[in-house]
Image (spheres, helix red, strand yellow):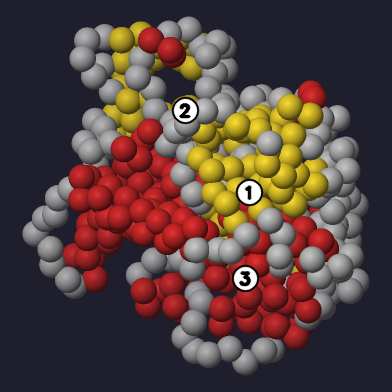
Amino acid sequence: MKHYDAIIIGSGQAGSPLSKKLANAGMKTLLIEKRFIGGTCVNDGCTPTKTMVASARLAYLAGKCNDMGINIKGYTVDLKQVVKRANGIVMKSRNGSQAAMEKTKNLDLLFGEANFIDKKTISVNPKTGKKRQFTADQIFINTGCKTIVPHDIEGLDDIEYLTSTSILKLEKVPEHLLIIGGNYIGLEFGQMFRRFGSKVTILEKSGRLLSREDEDISTEITGILEVEGIKVLTNTKALKFKNKGKSQVTATLDTGGKESKLKCTHVLVAIGRAPQTDTLGLETTGVAVDEKGYIKVNDKLETTQPGIYALGDVKGGPAFTHISYNDYTIVYRNLIEKLDLNTSDRPIPYCMFTDPELGRVGITETEARKQGLNIKVAKLPMAHVARALETGDTRGLMKAIVDADTKKILGVAVVGTEGGEIMTVLQMAMEGGITYDRIRYCVFAHPTYSESLNNLFMTLED
């Protein structure tokens, strides 16, 4: 049984850099990965999906070129080439990361599935060779999440349903894609495949898409999708699926208590994700999990068992790559640089990469009003943004929630081209305590999207 200073389970956006940092700090480190280096983000999350979203945007722009005086008689979508390009970028990132790890002194890399024997002992069933056991002074869990599949829906297991992973392997554009779930993943894939040529229907069980966002943001994005020909069915759930010959599925739906049938060729399950903790053997460690299986941690990311940490999606909370990476920086700097950092009050920015994208940070208007805060709300349609007019895409809006007393910015939502970049400008203002009245008269380069932050805050009365 080999002993290490540190064992890391999972090579996601926290596990990979943490393994190298600990090893470079002189700690004998073992990184265990059951699948591919890079976790979900690199292999079947951000990297391939945003690559394919870029291809879908080009298809959209090709269809719009005639409106701007560039005449294109027609275009075709080669999904095999789209997937090949995405896979090439994935492999470059994956292989590059693995090569860097294999060259790192004090770092061992083992491919296999890990589970705890006790709070200091890990058993690994490797892809090749016999089962092995290892001990460590400190253990870090970065196993991420997996797709939730509602097996209780009658007939779902009898059809070849798709997940956010398997849909990336398609080489033929679906004729009619039915998506169960109207949140970020479902909307990105829905718009992507609509632009590739699929008929798309999205089922959302609640009253509107993106229920965590303000209603005006939800309405704006829903309208954008519907203009592109995507059918959105709210207050709707799937009751049953049945195969009807080759590549033909009949779905029985419930919309507000009324049943209907819908024929499609492909079904994408996108109702959410669950933590990958069920095979870890945490019951042998004293590490507590919540009712959904997420690992409980304190604000320094340590579990209920001293010496065992959880980073990234597996611990619950915001499931974003950048949060996982920030978890790594907090843990590393606390352990090696002896700082006293924590996760309290860190900003939680995020983007949904529909087109136009949604950039979000801070609290929503709904949250602010529930908290009884004295706020003002600034809104500016992208149709009033000079850069948007010039580029020919005026879809969306800018929105900011500000404290009426301190004039500080509390939250931002931007739906528009470069929405994430515009949001980031305001996030920096929030981080630096810059008030909206200063931004109102700030000198920005013309013509940029961020220049219209002047106009956004001119909508507010002092």
Name the image quarter holding the C terminus: bottom right
Q: Which residue is under mark 3? A: 424
**Label ID, residue 269:** 2
**Residue 108: x, y in percent?**
57, 51
Residue 271 seen in this snapshot: no
For mark 1, what is the residue?
Answer: 30
Kind of residue at badge 3: Thr
Residue at the extreme front: 1
**Mark 3 and mark 1: span between their CA atoms?**
36 Å
State whether residue 394 is above or below residue 77: below
Query: Is residue 153 visible in the rendered structure shown here?
Result: yes
Give x and y (percent) for residue 10: 60, 44
Mark 3 vs mark 1: which is more N-terminal? 1
- Secondary structure type for disc 2: strand
Badge 2 local density, few (<14 within 10 Å), some, or many (20+)? Answer: many
Which quarter of the figure has residue 401? bottom right
Label number found at residue 260: none
The amino acid pointed to by label 2 is: Val
Above or below 130: residue 34: below
Q: Disc 1 or disc 2, which is closer to the eye?
A: 1
Q: Earlier in the sequence, mark 3 or mark 2?
A: 2
Q: Residue at x 43, y 54 (%)?
A: 94
Q: Which residue is at a point 31% across and 38% down the rendered structure image?
A: 169
Place of residue 49 in the rendered image (x, y in percent of width and height, measured from the top left): 41, 49
